[in-house]
């Protein structure tokens, strides 16, 4: 799944980073043709709200999950409103700041059902990259397919004038096939690291 | 994963993409450390190898188990879900897997980006089984357990994967026992791991477990995954309930 739970970052930074996901339930609606159509409808709603990233369109008809990344809570609120209006009966999960999501949900007349809280990382943390910003970038791919070396490589290219932070962020997003890597946030973090 | 030496141009692009730093350049040729390689296919799918030297190999048991625990697109035969975990709380508004007075726990070994040997799963499962947790039946990690004591299949213990998630649920009052296991593992385990706690939200919007966690000395992150309750189970007559 998306593993969007353990995205690392300061509160101000996370204000620009939300993932919205729709998921079919095994043994309940995953095999339903109607629910499958609903998943496509939801993906179209995501697409219609200017996501920063979106799961590739070819997967909409085959994957039990569709995902998108957004850069602010106002857009997420509009997505929630649209999903509520459609009333498709498909489970929706939002990854992001609890307080912001809760307020947005209250505004549209919804209440949180279940939360998955993060207690963070434990164990042999000396094995992790020393720069926090590198982890902030790599943890935006929930399956951790983006290597710290690729971030360092792109940083070198930016420093040498061979690419821009925007293009580097796009390049870094390539291994994240779920479409939840927030390229806008990655651009900001790369610019911060270059400085 | 294999890199054919005769085709390798030594450009090093695959080295950059490898999430677990299993590839190095030796005498102008990329070489994969097979012990470290988790068979995630990231190098093959992303490096655009100019010599087309990278080639997935037909993996045999037990090495074959590395792939679904590491690749995004590989589907576990058991769960039928691409990825390493289950639906857990994502569909809880439909499945009701986690009820009030219950908590879900996810312990993901090897995350973020370090990887883990599957033998480290047993570090936890021996302790958790003694406490008496209810493992998620659809979890690929649960499928590795061979008995009620939490022993992991001996054949796979030395296989390295990008991450492995132990998923289980407990009655809420057992949480402190689980937290003590996590504290001990924080000191003793030879890899990293992340921890998540699944909880239902009260009708007034509060999440009481946050206070319990903080009282027990754990820092709850400000961001979470939130099921917004739009899922509905379909009734026989075709209406949503």
Image (tube, coloured by chain):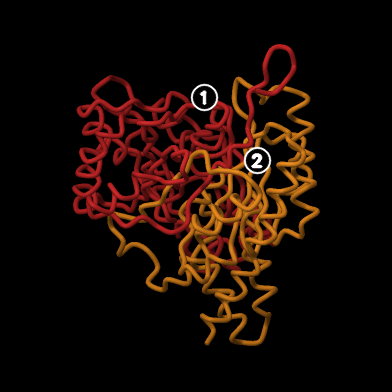
Residue B58 position by quadrant: top right
Dot label at residue B11: none
Instruction: Give the chain letter for orange.
Output: A
The residues tagged by marks 2 and 1 sit, at their Cα atoms, a distance apart of: 22 Å
Local packing at callout 1 (Cα closer than 10 Å; few below 14, some 14-19, many 20+) is few
Identify residue for label 1. Answer: B78
B237, above or below A18, in the image: above
Q: Is residue B160 left or right of residue B120?
A: right
Local packing at callout 2 (Cα closer than 10 Å; few below 14, some 14-19, many 20+) is many
Instruction: Give the chain letter for red.
Output: B
Residue extending furthest top? B236
Q: Are marks 2 and 1 in contact (CB under 8 Å)?
A: no
Q: Position of residue A35 (x, y in %)?
A: 73, 28
Q: Secondary structure at mark 1?
A: loop
Q: Is residue B221 left or right of residue B82?
A: left
Identify residue for label 2. Answer: A22
């Amino acid at each position: 799944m998306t593993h969007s739970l353990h995205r690392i970052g300061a509160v101000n930074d996370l204000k620009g980073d939300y993932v919205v996901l729709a998921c079919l339930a095994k043994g309940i609606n995953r095999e339903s043709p109607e629910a499958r159509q609903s998943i496509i409808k939801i993906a179209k709603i995501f697409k219609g709200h200017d996501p920063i990233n979106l799961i590739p369109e070819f997967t909409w008809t085959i994957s039990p999950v569709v995902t998108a990344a957004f850069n602010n809570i106002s857009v997420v609120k509009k997505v929630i409103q649209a999903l509520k209006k459609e009333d498709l009966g498909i489970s929706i999960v939002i990854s992001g700041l609890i307080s912001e999501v809760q307020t947005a949900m209250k505004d549209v007349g919804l209440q949180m059902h279940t939360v998955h809280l993060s207690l963070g990382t434990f164990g042999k943390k000396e094995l992790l990259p020393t720069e926090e910003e590198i982890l902030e970038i790599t943890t935006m791919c929930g399956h951790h397919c983006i290597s710290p070396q690729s971030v360092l490589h792109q940083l070198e290219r930016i420093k040498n004038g061979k690419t821009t932070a925007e293009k580097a962020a796009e390049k870094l997003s390539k291994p994240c096939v779920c479409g939840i890597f927030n390229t806008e946030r990655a651009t900001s973090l790369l610019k911060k690291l270059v400085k | 994963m294999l890199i054919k030496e005769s085709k390798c141009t030594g450009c090093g692009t695959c080295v950059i993409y490898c999430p677990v730093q299993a590839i190095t350049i030796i005498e102008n040729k990329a070489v994969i450390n097979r012990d470290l390689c988790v068979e995630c296919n990231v190098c093959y799918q992303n490096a655009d190898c100019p010599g087309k030297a990278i080639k997935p190999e037909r993996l045999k048991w037990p090495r074959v188990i590395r792939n679904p625990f590491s690749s995004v697109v590989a589907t576990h035969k058991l769960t039928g879900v691409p990825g390493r975990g289950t639906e857990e709380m994502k569909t809880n508004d439909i499945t009701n897997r986690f009820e009030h007075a219950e908590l879900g726990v996810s312990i993901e070994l090897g995350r973020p980006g370090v990887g883990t040997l599957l033998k480290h799963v047993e570090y936890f499962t021996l302790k958790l089984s003694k406490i008496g947790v209810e493992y998620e039946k659809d979890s690929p990690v649960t499928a590795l357990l061979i008995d009620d004591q939490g022993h992991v299949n001996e054949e796979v213990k030395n296989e390295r994967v990008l991450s492995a998630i132990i998923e289980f649920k407990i009655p809420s009052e057992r949480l402190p026992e689980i937290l003590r296991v996590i504290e001990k593992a924080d000191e003793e385990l030879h890899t990293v791991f992340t921890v998540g706690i699944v909880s239902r939200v009260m009708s007034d919007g509060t999440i009481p477990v946050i206070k319990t966690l903080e009282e027990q000395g754990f820092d709850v992150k400000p961001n979470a995954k939130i099921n917004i309750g739009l899922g509905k189970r379909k009734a026989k007559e075709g209406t949503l309930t």
